[in-house]
Structure formats: C-alpha cells, structure tokens
Image (cartoon, rainbow, N blue to C red):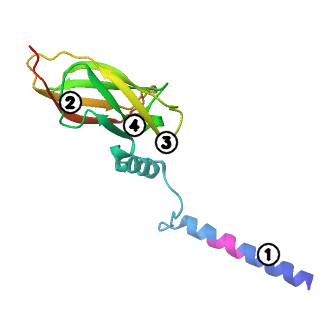
Amino acid sequence: MKKYVLILAILNLVSSCKKTSENEGSENHSKEGIISTEENAASVEAEKTSEEISELIQINTPKEGAVIKSPLQLSGKAKGYWFFEADAPVKLLDENGNLLAKTYIKATDDWMTRNWVNFEGNLEFEVRSQKSGYLVFERANPSGLEENENQYKFPVRFIQQD
C-alpha cells in the first residue's frame, strides 16, 4: 500500500512539473500577480497625483484670492510629513512667477507624525507695481528628489502701498 501511495505522489509531482514547464514556454503565459517595476512606479505615481492637496495642507490665513499686505501672517495645518525639522518653505511670486519673498512656516506641535500639525509663519515683502501674485506653500524636501516634491499654490492680490 505504501508503494502505491508513493508511486501516485511521484506521478502527481512529475505531472505538475511538466505543466509548469509547458506554461513557462508558452507565449501566452499569464503573469498574474507579478508586477513589473514600471507598473509599480506608475501605480505609485497615480496614487500620488490622486491624493488631494486638501488632504495634506489646509491654509487658514490668508484665504485664496485674499488681498494681502506686508507683514503677512500665515496659519493653518498640514500633515506632519509636510515638514522637515518642523519647517516648510513658503514663497510669494508676482503674476509673472518672479520671486518677491521667501520664508518658512513653523510647526507649532510635534511634527513627527502622519496626523495634522498646526503651523504659523510671517512673510514680509515689498510690492511696487504688481497687482497680484501667488502664494506657494511647498512641502519640505531635504532629499531633493522630485518624487518628494509637492506644493499648494493659490492666487492673491496686493494692497498697493505708497
């Protein structure tokens, strides 16, 4: 009886090895469950672009389209990974994309979390003839890697100062 079971087991093993070998040689071999590096990168990129900026950073002051003057108080909240060493850069651009000023927002709570962290900042700037521009909150990116870049950019208008 033991010989019979052993022979059946060997025949079963040989049969399954032969089927696997035939499938590997087939041009129509299914790669189900195998993800290439390119497919994985595309999946990660799609996930990154589908992530709404409002799920990463929310600005309390100033609001989008606000009329602003210097010094400008900045406040809001962002996910902890928006910061590095509790800071993240902010830029003020004119309507042509020229840099008017740059500063950093500072986390007011523990930033080493995936949760929301409050922040504050102060931006001093000078405008001459510019009427509008953009406030750009950038994610801290000490690595310099493009895949870690992210920003929230919205329009603002300037109070004309004499």
Q: Which residues are magenta?
A: 15-19
The majority secondary structure of the magenta stretch comes to helix
- Specify which label sits upstream in the sequence, 3 or 1: 1
Report how far apart the C-alphas of labels 3 and 4 lie in the structure: 10 Å
Is 52 situated left or right of 126 in this image?
right
- Specify which label sits upstream in the sequence, 3 or 4: 4
Report which quarter residue 7 is drawn in.
bottom right
Report if the CB atoms under discs 2 and 1 are less than 8 Å apart: no
Residue 77, which numbered label?
A: 4
Residue 10, which numbered label?
A: 1
Residue at image point 80% right, 77% down: 9
10 shown above or below 140:
below
Q: Which residue is mark 2?
A: 134
Q: Nearer the viewer, mark 4 or mark 2?
A: 4
Residue 56 horizontal/vertical position (percent): 39, 41
How packed mark 1 is, by other alpha carbons closer than 10 Å (few <14, some 14-19, many 20 or more), is few
Which SS class for mark 4?
Answer: strand
Report which quarter residue 158 is drawn in.
top left
Question: What's under tag 2, amino acid-wise?
Answer: Tyr
Residue 43 horizontal/vertical position (percent): 42, 52
Report how far apart the C-alphas of labels 3 and 2 lie in the structure: 27 Å
Question: What's under tag 4, amino acid-wise?
Answer: Lys
Residue at image point 55% right, 65% down: 25
Q: Residue 19 or 144: which is nearer the viewer?
A: 144
How packed mark 4 is, by other alpha carbons closer than 10 Å (few <14, some 14-19, many 20 or more), is many
Is 32 magenta? The answer is: no
